[in-house]
Amino acid sequence: MRLLLVEDERALAAAVGRGLREEGHVVDLCETGEDALAQGRRLSYDAILLDWGLPDLDGLSVLRAWRREGLQTPVIMLTARDAIPEKVAGFEAGADDYLPKPFAFEELLARLGAIARRAGGAAVLRTEAGDVVLDVRRRALARGDAEVTLTAREFDLASAFFGHPGDVLTRGELMTRVWGPDFDGEPNVVDVYVGYLRRKLGHLASARTRIETVRGLGWRLVVAR
């Protein structure tokens, strides 16, 4: 599934994001309500995990704004508020499910699975960009009969690019998505892994799908027609 995780507790966001990616999901992270509001409008997701207590615009206000605008993406509210009136407020605002903190990761997976079944869908196992496929189950890139396997970091990086073809992804965005918001290593590790991923795309000899450097900004996955 392609998921948006909206959570300002960095340790929790990093742990949940890492666990979801290990399960094969593509995960984007927002830490503020305003960023979440814009991200939900800009991109299509299979489900959104939305924290109630955000530092600027609270999750309930974000959810109400999305529903007013017609966004029908399933939303699971994540919150320490478990009083009945607050749960009712969440459902009335348009939440599809409610998961009080602290929660077990296995329960979160079960609730996501239930949402996928209700929607009549299943987890996205293949993402195509041009003539190249990112195979989630095999953790590989493939073109025709050719295939190259990816390391865990390379797979997370590929998921970010394949989840947002054509979008410019900055070094900071990729570091947060792939290494987590608390990573304090060298920033050029992103450049190194982008290089690794480029070489593996090159092994597939694709003339249509490539990673392009956008000078001064970052990189984007280019898909030629």
Image (cartoon, rainbow, N blue to C red):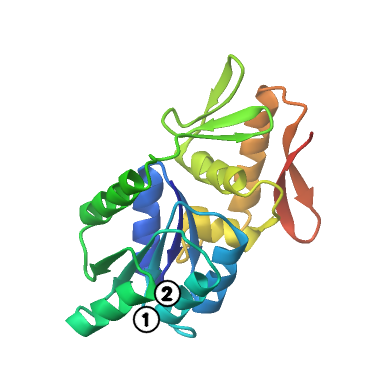
When asked about the image quadrant of residue 61, the answer is bottom left
Regarding mark 2 in the picture, which secondary structure is present there?
Answer: loop
In the image, what residue occupies the spot 60% across and 42% down? 162
Residue 8 is tagged as 2
Q: Position of residue 189 (x, y in %)?
A: 59, 51
9 displayed left or right of 203: left
Q: Amino acid at mark 2?
A: Asp
Q: Is 216 in front, or is 97?
A: 97
Q: Is 224 in front, or is 97?
A: 97
Q: Is 196 in front, or is 148?
A: 148
Q: Quadrant of the C terminus?
A: top right
Residue closest to the far top:
145
Q: Are marks 2 and 1 in contact (CB under 8 Å)?
A: yes
Residue 183 appears in the figure:
yes
Q: Is 179 in front, or is 55?
A: 55
Cα separation between marks 2 and 1: 8 Å
Regarding mark 1 in the picture, which secondary structure is present there?
Answer: loop
